[in-house]
Image: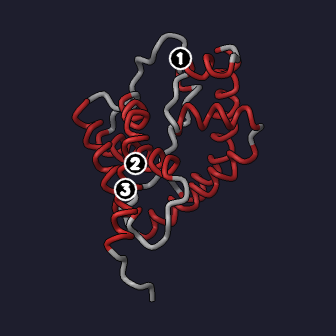
Amino acid sequence: MEPPATSHTMTERDNDITATVVRERKRLVNFIRRRIRDPEDAEDILQDVFQEFVQAYRLPAPIEQASAWLFRAARNRIVDRFRKKREEPLADLPAGEEESSGEYRLDLALPAHDAGPEALYARAVLLKALQGALDELPANQREVFIAHELEGRSFKDMVAESGVALNTLLARKRYAVLHLRARLQSIYDELGI
């Protein structure tokens, strides 16, 4: 049994939580707002994610990569919100980021995290399969997919940072999405989702 946390330990954890929230808030807000129309809904999701983060961070098992954890949690909340409201993701992206006919979007449908043991199992299987499928991608495709879909970075920023042409980045993401869709379809079929 682990000894109770001292006030010193809790203060360190609270400082870590605060530093992470301050560091990631802007990117996380941009990530959520690109996918949620209603600013109030976007703020609700942001607050839910931060609340979940605080609770998870205080558990004995540490969160290894706080940034990745936050973006996964936000994506899961967004997917849950779309499933409940049956809304479509935002279509008005900045110039040069068209995702016409959804060919550049994965729109991974994960079972809700609070939908019972079968849904939790399905969610775990899908997340494991997604990680495996991401690991199979060439590094350049994986990096573009993760940067855009999971970290919420814009193609414009990626072009500026990498010097790689926009069309090349779009093509890399498209190939990644096609691979992930094909790879995950059998899992969806097996789970009956």
Rounded to the nearest angstrom, the CA distance separating label 3 from label 2 is 6 Å
| Residue under numbered circle 1 | 97
Quarter containing the N terminus: bottom left
Q: Nearer the viewer, residue 92 or 44?
A: 44
Extreme-front residue of the structure: 8
| Residue under numbered circle 2 | 19
Residues under numbered marks 3 and 2 in contact, where contact means CB atoms less than 8 Å apart: yes
Nearer to us: label 2 or label 1: 2
Residue 132 lies left or right of residue 93; in this view the side is right
Extreme-left residue of the structure: 40
In the image, residue 71 sits, relative to residue 90, either above or below, namely below
Percent coordinates x, y for residue 162 in the rendering: 68, 22
- Secondary structure under badge 1? loop
Q: Amino acid at mark 1?
A: Glu
Residue at 41% x, 21% y: name it: 91
| Residue under numbered circle 3 | 15
Colouring convention used in this rendered image of the protein: secondary structure
Q: Nearer the viewer, residue 159 or 82?
A: 159
Residue 18 lies left or right of residue 105; in this view the side is left
